[in-house]
Image: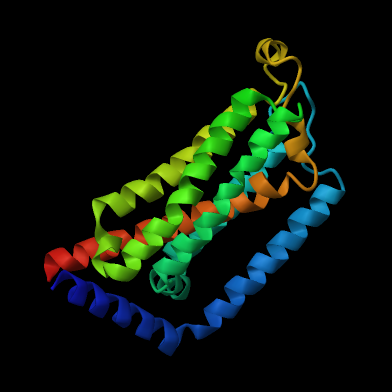
Amino acid sequence: MKNEITGRITENVASELNNGHSSVRSAVFTTLALWLGLVSFLASQGAFVGNADSPPLPIFLGLAIPLAVFFAAYFGWRAFRAFILGADLRLVAAMQAWRWAGLGFLSLYAHGVLPGLFAFPAGLGDMAIGISAPWIVLRLIRQPSFAASRQYMIWNILGIVDFVVAVSMGTLCSGFFHGITGLMGNVTTGPMAQLPLVLIPAYMVPFFTMLHFTALFQARQLARARKSA
């Protein structure tokens, strides 16, 4: 019964999307491509490289501005909100599987490129989400009502928490806090401000965060609809 209700709700949202807001899909994909191009260009010009004696503000802005645009569009643009609420959650969860590549942080730590205080929580957290993503996808396929469950919400919240921890550790290890830098053998997260690593905090992190919020927005809507039904 729950699966039937969830299925009907999802179909209704998807129908609204296809009938009235199909152009939003093209706009979103175009924006994602332009965003990637802009970040790559700015990074090639050294725009994300900050002063060692100051917080990594350029990277923070590169992360925060896209998220601010996402939330502004969601709450202020009805067509975009319909697009988000009609997204295929199986695909959204499957894309998180790319985060198994957090293993790369551990490799960079082993080669002395990144500090362990950042590499371990960031790498292991990403790997945990990436490795568990296929099971989440299978659960969504077999049991659509799982999208409205507390377990699904917690998984997405943990994915966001992982990013918060990684960004916090990255800031601490940026070289701005000289005491911490000394304890780490003067190895900082400075390489994260340069290509290709800068694509992670300035593009991948906000993008995957948007995917998590897409899932949470849908989960909230489905949970409310189930209660009312």
* In the image, farthest residue toward the bottom: 19
Q: Position of residue 64 (x, y in %)?
A: 59, 46
* Camera sees residue 146: yes
Work out whether residue 163 or residue 17 is closer to the camera in this orientation and state it. Answer: 163
* In the image, farthest residue toward the right: 45
Q: Position of residue 23 (x, y in %)?
A: 55, 83
User: In which quarter of the view is residue 78 placed?
Assistant: bottom left
Q: In the rendered view, would you say 48 is above or below 224? A: above
Q: In the rendered view, would you say 208 is above or below 60? A: below
Q: In the rendered view, would you say 62 is above or below 172? A: below
User: Which colour scheme appears in the figure?
Assistant: rainbow
Instruction: Give the residue drawn at x 65%, y 37%.
Output: 105
Look at the image and tell me in which quarter the N terminus lies. bottom left
Look at the image and tell me in which quarter the C terminus lies. bottom left
User: In which quarter of the view is residue 215 placed?
Assistant: bottom left
* Camera sees residue 68: no
Say how many tags the image has. 0
Work out whether residue 191 or residue 49 is closer to the camera in this orientation and state it. Answer: 191
In the picture provided, is 158 more to the left or to the right than 9? right
In the picture provided, is 5 more to the left or to the right than 40? left
User: In which quarter of the view is residue 198 placed?
Assistant: top right
Instruction: Give the residue drawn at x 56%, y 57%.
Output: 69
Q: Position of residue 30 (x, y in %)?
A: 66, 73
Instruction: Give the residue drawn at x 33%, y 46%.
Output: 154
Q: Position of residue 176 (x, y in %)?
A: 70, 21
